[in-house]
Image (tube, rainbow, N blue to C red):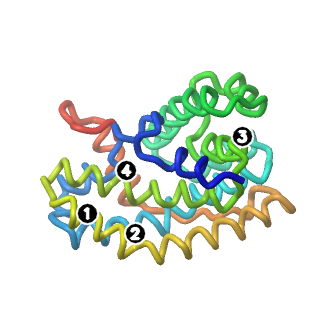
Amino acid sequence: MSRAALLVLADGRFPAGGHAHSGGAEAAVKAGLITGAEGLEAFCRGRLHTTGLVSAALAAAAALGVDPLSLDAAADARTPSVALRVASRKLGRQLMRAARATWPSEELDALAREFPKGAHQPVVLGLAARAAGLGAGDAAYCSAYECVSGPASAVVRLLSLDPFDATGVLARVAGEVDLVVDAAVESAVEAARGGVDVLPAASAPLLEVGAEGHAAWSVRLFAS
């Protein structure tokens, strides 16, 4: 298992398209829910323990070899918002292109053939980690960290927030990222034994509502 491969996959410069998405932060900023570092921290914590947990568990399960078609259906069922489902598949398609070029894999090729318009991003992430020789915990860490680092980077651009303050937010939630990853991997192991229904289904209604409103904006900085 290569630690360097984990760094490549988790690097924000990996061409997976995440820079174009705010993870719901743009809608939260407009709604006045994020006005500075304190609001960003609360937003990241809420996202981490809901959609972040779900995504990390899906990624971990894919890395363990759970059927990706079942995982994709599970991701669909856990994403009520049409806008978020569309965004997840777009991100999955972009990540698939980058992953197949970086770590050629028959499993990635098969998933790409099954979903030419994109499988859900966490499922692709888990298979990419698997192709890179990484484990379930690595995939879960990539997913969980991306869940908070994406909004933090977006808020720096949206509010001209001091990057040092944004980095401080990420440092303060790091311990909770560890907890979410542990829970995600535990549920992924159970899914490998008993099926995808045991995976977390935590919800974040404001993210769903915000995503639907955001998708209708005529002018926006981020795709989602």
- Mark 4: which amino acid? Gly
Q: Give the Cα distance between marks 1 and 3.
A: 32 Å
- Residue 80 appears in view: yes
**Position of residue 74 measured from the top left corner of the image (x, y, whole percent):** 67, 49
Is 218 positioned to the left or the right of 140 in the image? left
Quickly name the residue at label 3: 131
Question: For numbered disc 3, what is the local secondary structure?
Answer: helix
Front position among marks 1 and 2: 1
Tag 3 or tag 1, which sits nearer the N-term?
A: 3
Q: Residue at x 63, y 64 (%)?
A: 200
Mark drawn on residue 33: none
**As shown in the figure, which amino acid type bears the numbered disc 3?**
Ala
Q: Is residue 216 above or below residue 159?
A: above
Question: Taking the image as drawn, is residue 73 in sight?
Answer: no
Label 4 to label 1: alpha-carbon separation? 15 Å
Out of 194 and 109, give the one closest to the viewer.
109
Labels 4 and 3: the sequence-earlier one: 4
Amino acid type of the residue tagged 2 in the rendering: Gly
Position of the C terminus, as image quadrant, is top left
Quick check: 60 left or right of 220?
right
Locate residue 88, reporting x and y percent.
50, 40
Of badges 4 and 3, nearer the viewer stands 3
The local crowd at label 1, few if under 14, some if 14 to 19, many if 20 or more residues have their Cα within 10 Å, is many
Q: Which residue is mark 2?
A: 46
Disc 4 target residue: 23
What residue lies at 33% left-to-right and 54% top-to-bottom? Answer: 151
